[in-house]
Image (cartoon, rainbow, N blue to C red):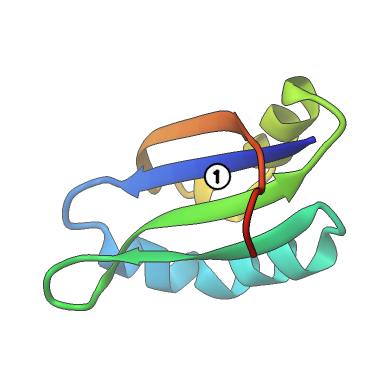
């Protein structure tokens, strides 16, 4: 089952994101569950959030995966929403 993880950064947290980006990307690459991922961009083209599509057996597994993200440990996000998602095109 696929899940879309949508996370929005706290205001003025670009430096926190940059400082933890290498660990975050390494975590993404180490997981077979990540189907696609990338940052949201603000009006200046700067990173301000994340979209990650996960292939997981259930919501609990998706939540457990998200809890281990280095960005979570860095307290980067103002909000995180995980929603079951059905791929139709692409």
Residue at 42% x, 44% y is 7
Q: Which residue is mark 1?
A: 73
Residue at 83% x, 58% y is 31
Image coords of residue 86 (percent x, y): 66, 39
Pick out the residue farthest to the left.
Answer: 43
In the displayed structure image, the side of residue 26 where residue 81 appears, left or right: left
SS under mark 1: helix
Rendered view: 50 above or below 78:
below
Pick out the residue farthest to the top.
Answer: 60
Residue at 12% x, 70% y is 43
In the displayed structure image, the side of residue 43 where residue 13 appears, left or right: right
Image coords of residue 76 (percent x, y): 39, 48
The count of marks equals: 1
Quadrant in the picture for the N terminus: top right
Image coords of residue 60 (percent x, y): 76, 21
Q: Residues within 10 Å of mark 1 (few under 14, many from 20)?
A: few
Quadrant in the picture for the C terminus: bottom right
Rendered view: 85 above or below 38:
above
Of residues 42 and 27, the one nearer the viewer is 42
Task: Write down the quadrant of residue 75 in the picture.
Answer: top left
Rendered view: 50 above or below 45:
above
Rendered view: 88 above or below 30:
above
Pick out the residue farthest to the front.
Answer: 89
Residue at 55% x, 44% y is 73
């Amino acid at each position: 089952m696929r899940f879309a993880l949508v996370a929005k950064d706290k205001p003025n947290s670009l430096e926190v994101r940059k400082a933890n980006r290498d660990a975050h990307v390494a975590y993404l690459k180490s997981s077979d569950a990540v189907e696609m991922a990338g940052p949201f961009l603000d009006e200046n083209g700067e990173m301000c959030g994340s979209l990650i599509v996960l292939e997981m057996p259930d919501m609990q597994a998706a939540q457990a995966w998200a809890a281990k993200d280095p960005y979570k440990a860095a307290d980067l996000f103002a909000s995180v929403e995980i929603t079951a998602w059905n791929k139709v095109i692409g």
